[in-house]
Each structure stands twice: as C-alpha cells, then as structure tokens.
Image (cartoon, rainbow, N blue to C red):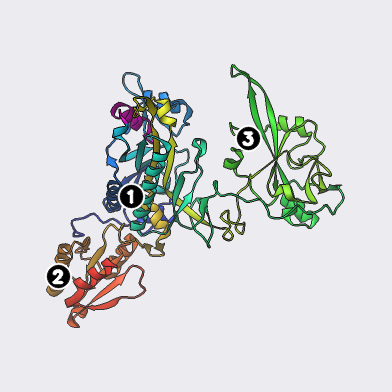
Amino acid sequence: MKASRFFVSTLKEAPADAEVASHRLMMRAGMIKKLGTGIYTYMPMGLRVIRKVEAIVREEMNRAGAVELAMPVVQPAEFWQETGRFDKMGPELLRIKDRHDRDFVVQPTSEEVVTDIARQEIRSYKQLPKNFYQIQTKFRDERRPRFGLMRGREFIMKDAYSFDRDLGAAKASYQVMADAYRRIFDRFGLRYRAVAADSGAIGGDLSEEFQVIAATGEDAIVYCPGSDYAANMEKAEALAPAGPRPAAAKALEKTPTPGKATCADVAELLGVPLSTTVKSLVLATDIVDEAGNPKGSQVWLLLLRGDHDMNEIKVGKVPGLDQGFRFATLAEIDEHFGCKPGYLGPLNLKKPVKLVADREAAVLADWITGANEIDFHMTGVNWGRDLPEPELVADLRNVVAGDASPDGKGVLAIERGIEVGHVFVLGTKYSKDMNATYLDESGKPQFLEMGCYGIGITRLPAAAIEQNHDERGIIWPDALAPFTVVVCPIGMDRSPEVKVVAEALYEQLLAAGVDVLLDDRGERPGAMFADWELIGVPHRVVISDRGLKEGQLEYQHRRDTAATKVPAAGITEFITGKLAK
C-alpha cells in the first residue's frame, strides 16, 4: 500500500474524554472515530489491526476443528424468553420492537441461538462433538461506557460453543479450546496469563480467563512466581493460617473510641496493627413462603480481619448465602445490633444472627471489634472465652500479596490485567432450558453438554496498546501492526534516485510477502517519522540522498533508540530476516 492512496489521519491532541492510553492513542493515530457514546467507527488504519486479529483467531479456531457460522445481530426475543434471560438480564440487554410490535434483542452473546441450531440439527451421538464459532458484532448497553474500545457498547467478539455427549467429552473439548487460545495469544506477541476463574452459578472448575498484563488493567491477577499457579481475584483461595490459634493474653474491655467508626481509625487511635481488628459486615437473605411471598429476612454477620476485603463471589458460595444475598438495611441492623454501622460487633446482640468468620478472623486472639454502642469498641476479644466458637468458618476474603500459594510452592503476587478471552464449560444449563437433546446408543434422549469460548476482537488491540506504548505513540507487535514495515523516503519528490530506490524496495518487500507501506506523501522528515511512531509501525526504513551516496539505508525498530545503517544492496534480506525472528 502507498500512503497517498491510503487514509492517514493523525491528531496532535487526543479528545478530552479519552482517559486511558489506548483510547488516546487510537484516536490520535486515526484508528477509531467516535460516533456516539461507546460507539466507534473503525477507521481504515484501525480496521487493518482488527482484521489481523480476526485472521489469527480464525486460523487457530479452524485448526482446532471449530466450524464457522454467523448468527444474527438482531434476534427474536422468544429464544431468550425460553431461558429466562429476556427478563433476568438487566438493562445491558438492548430490547427492541419491530413494526408488528414483536420483541427482539440486539445480541450481546448467542447461547440461545446456537442452542436452537443444535436442537434442530444434532440428532445422534454420531454427530458429536461439534464446535460452532462466529466473529460477529455484539452490543451491550453499558451504563457507563468508557476507555474507548476497552468498554464500548458495540464491539466485535469471537464466540464459540461446543456440544458434547457427556461431561467427560465436554472437558476434552474445553481443553482443545484452552490449547487453541494459548496458541492464539502466543501468536499475538503479547505478555499474558491464563488464570483460573470462577464459573459462577454454573459451578465446576473448568473456567479460565486470558488476561493481557497491563498496569492500567481493571482486573487483579493473582499468581505464584515460583510455580504455574494463576487465578483471578474472585477465584484465588486464601488458605487457612498454619498453626493453632494463640492463647488469650488480654482481658475483655469496653474501650472508648470517640468518633472512630472504621477499623483503620480505631487501630490508629489505640496504636495497634490493623490486623488485630475485626470488621463486621451485615448481610441479609430474604425468606419466602411456598408461594414465593416474602415472610421476613435472616440477618448474617460476617467477620473479617480489619486489613482484609470481602470477596462477594466467595461469600456467594457460603451455604445459606448461595441463593442470593444483600446488604442489610439500617432497620434490620438496628433491630439486631441496636447500633448504627461503624461500631458493630458479635457481642451484646439484641437479636441472634447467623455468624460466619473468615479463616483468618477465626484464629485471631485478643482482637478488637465494635461494642454495639456508639463511640465504643471491645478490645481483648477471644473466641471460646468471650463468645462461642464460630458456627461457620469460610474463605470470605480477597487474597493479598504475600499470602501462601494454594499449590504450596511459595507466596502470591498480584499484578493488573485486561481480560481479552474466557473459556468455560456451560454444562446443560441452556440445553435443558431449550430442550436440546441427542439420542445416545440406546436411542434415549440426553441433554447436550455445552462449552463457551470468547475473545474480545476489538478489545484486544486496545489491550495490546495498554501494554505496548511510550511517549511517542503505539508500539505494535508485528502480528498486530496495521503495517509491518514502513518505507520513509526523504525528498522523494525532489530526488529521482531516492524515488527509484524507494519504489524498488517497496516492490521487493511486497514480492517477499511483507505487509509494507510506502510513505509517498512528500511530508517533511519530522512529520513523517512522528506519524509512524504514533501509529506504531514496528519496522522503519529511511532512504535519503546522503545515505545513498554512502550506499547505506537506515533501519530502526520502533523500540530502538537509534537507527542502524544497512547496506542498500542487502536491505530486503535484512528486513525479512528481522521479521523471521
């Protein structure tokens, strides 16, 4: 491609609403253009990147035996009503009506449609396994779209769905996809981690997220530097402390803490470590009768060490809380504790509550908690002496750096990541809701076991930029760059020799299969170089009269601090050698 025939449109300044590096740089590099809130046009330069992402994904999905199709963006609501998601999904699901007042949705994902295909087309166990995938536009009506393509409302996604005869076969299909994803992300040339993830209501352990490592990532990734252990924050287990609980050494006292309503403030006032305090979190579960009518609530008290944070996913797996919970109302808190939040604790309750202690809180001695009286806390609290042993102990908290690794091979570290892919086993959730069955060897109908596998096609370039940029602009890995090599002739319009050499090199690189662009726009060197550094083309060749007189051209990788002189006669082999590494 020649720049004069392409569309190059760069900006010196990013729009004011561009908050993160990828958003700023994609706008400045002319890769995307905002049309509406969370909706972007993929401009020619950005579309080339997206198409490269799609090509790698498509090659590896086909290699893994998946079969491509394309499901509609606009889908009849009846399929979503079969699974209940039409009503259960929140406002993120864009619901529309046609001229006949029939309900439709703009798809955020396609489990219902692909399950309908399977129940119509898959009749026998002999047709299994099957894996259908698409690369298709999606829409989620995000309440707060931001960060450009990182969290837009319209986006492109690769979603795949496997169908198997039983759980064992589904696990095998899952592993095929997990391996394919590793090949995909290896080819992108990005630093990433595959981390164990929570499977939510589906249950089971077969769930992995693929996270691109970036300091601006929204997700916390937990890993062990001394092993292969990696998990997201929701999944990472906080082990029970080793060793017995220390013996009580302090007397129970009611201690004045005027105006100190947080664990941190209390610890500072008393001059003790925050880890000796215990925070009280009050939850509630609603009780209904057989007809589904509300008939009261059950109040729960969760106790965690003051320096730890509650993990809602883990709490949602506690027996009794696993069917849904909420934070207690002020009225419920007053009814059971007789005090406002900030001074709550497990002693001197007005009414009984269900108490759950985190593993760390359950082994504390001489700890500090609220006295259920404003401006007072209890110090020197001990299990068994001052209150009964906790009736239930569970892992309720987020892990922190330095915690023991669950695999026993060291301690945990935490870094930030951007989720760009997710693979997990769905089980029979959708096949049961939609009666998608096949006939086994004995002729009996069995529900199809499903798996789901997604990659954020348009999110991935943004994640790549978050990981690869500097003060001058983007630094693309070769596999993702809109152009792999740019040839920059200086004074091409004035020097016949520069023009001849530039066009000859351009043709040679094209013939060698290199994705090359010739900048024939006649720009000044500074402006020309600034454009390609902003856009992030990884390999640059500069041709000038001065260099040609010496028989030399200048090569510079986007990460290099200085150019390298290369003999003009061997430049094509030099470039192709660089690309082969």
Q: Residues within 10 Å of mark 2 (few under 14, many from 20)?
A: many
* Residue at the (39%, 24%) spot, across then down: 435
* Foreground: disc 3 or disc 1: 3
Residue type marked 3: Pro
Q: Is residue 109 magenta?
A: yes
Residue 487, how many percent across, how many down? 22, 67
Quick one: label 3 or label 1, which is nearer the N terminus?
1
Q: Magenta region: which residues? A: 108-124
* Element assignment for label 1: strand
Which residue is tagged 1?
Answer: 32
Quick one: label 2 or label 1, which is nearer the N terminus?
1
269 on left or right of 180:
right
* Residue at the (33%, 67%) spot, across then down: 558
Q: Is residue 133 magenta?
A: no
Q: Is residue 572 above or below residue 100?
A: below
* Element assignment for label 2: helix
Question: Marks 3 and 2, how far apart in space?
Answer: 75 Å
Residue type marked 1: Ile
* Residue at the (64%, 30%) spot, across then down: 285
Residue type marked 2: Lys
Q: Is residue 122 above or below residue 290?
A: below
Which residue is tagged 3?
Answer: 319
Q: Residues within 10 Å of mark 1 (few under 14, many from 20)?
A: many
Question: Marks 3 and 1, how far apart in space?
Answer: 48 Å
* Residue at the (27%, 46%) spot, across then down: 62
Q: Which mark is residue 499?
A: 2
